[in-house]
Image (cartoon, coloured by chain):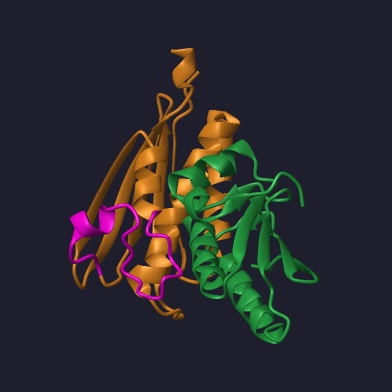
Chain colours: A orange, B green
Amino acid sequence: MSAENIMKVSFLSRSGNETLARMVVSAFLVQADPTVEELDDIKTAVSEAVTNSIVHGYGIESSDKYIEMQMSIEDNIFSIAIIDNGCGIEDIDKAMEAFYSGDSTGERSGMGFTIMQAFMSDFRVESVVGEGTSVYMKKLLHERQV
Amino acid sequence: METEQVRYEINGDCIVIYMPREVDNHSSRGIREDTERLLEQYSKRPIRYMIFDFSGTSFCDSSGIGVILGRCRRMRMLGGTVYVSGESCRIERILRMSGVYQVAERAEKV
């Protein structure tokens, strides 16, 4: 039986809310009964996208900046959009390069987008400078059973 | 969110960092600050070996990779070496993807 469900949540852009995002997504996924590996892939990809919004999108912690997550399950496909209204990405191709980071402190791996691409079945980024960034990802669940 | 306590063990010229259950942007920040402070504090009898022990870790994303790569750079400047130990195959996968094994050694057991 394929469960169908949709959830939308918004939470503050604040360090510490990466955990909250992973917990929310994990809770939503219970109904789809993913494998441990599938759940881990999704949690990692979501963590990367949310971290990007907090660290790069909004940059500074503030009390009125929100990150929105919209997720759905349909026919064993988990879809999620992670949306911020932050600074946007000037050069998406550059940002996608492995080991490239917009942060110059040398403390960031530059692997966020590479990991999202590797861990999810489908991945797309839309960004407008000064308006924000949206990351759309899909994961096919129970692939081995097909 | 409450931050998990990270344990640091210093023995002679070696520091072991027992990584938290979940290593992400939030927990990585504290690890970076703590290790920098300890390296500074012990600069008179320098720390040569830094071991990241992942045996208690079930989740690690690229922020965790960033803190390891940053420490590798620091330790190389100080003439020291970084080791990684106790990682599960899931964490091994992300460390391998990110090139951590090219700059850090693997330790079988702490």
Give the x, y percent position of residue A110. 37, 59
Query: Whole-percent x and y of residue A78?
Result: 42, 35
Q: Is A68 situated left or right of A86 in this image?
A: right
Looking at the image, residue B61 sits to the left or right of residue A64; the answer is right
Vertical comparison of A99 with A137: above or below: below
Residue placed furthest toward the front: B79
Q: Is residue A21 above or below residue B25?
A: above
Total tally of numbered discs in the picture: 0
Q: Does the magenta portion include A24?
A: no
- Viewer-nearest residue: A126 or B93: B93
Q: Quadrant of residue B78?
A: bottom right
Q: Position of residue B28 (x, y in %)?
A: 57, 66
Left or right: where B80 falls relative to A4: right
- Considering every residue shown, the one lying at the far top of the view is A146
In which quadrant is the C terminus of chain A drawn?
A: top left
Q: Is residue A104 magenta?
A: yes
- Point out the stretch of residues depicted in magenta: A88-111
Q: Is residue A141 above or below residue A43?
A: above
Q: Is residue B76 visible?
A: yes
Q: Position of residue A4 (x, y in %)?
A: 44, 30
Q: Quadrant of residue A123?
A: top left
For the stretch drawn in magenta, the main secondary structure is loop
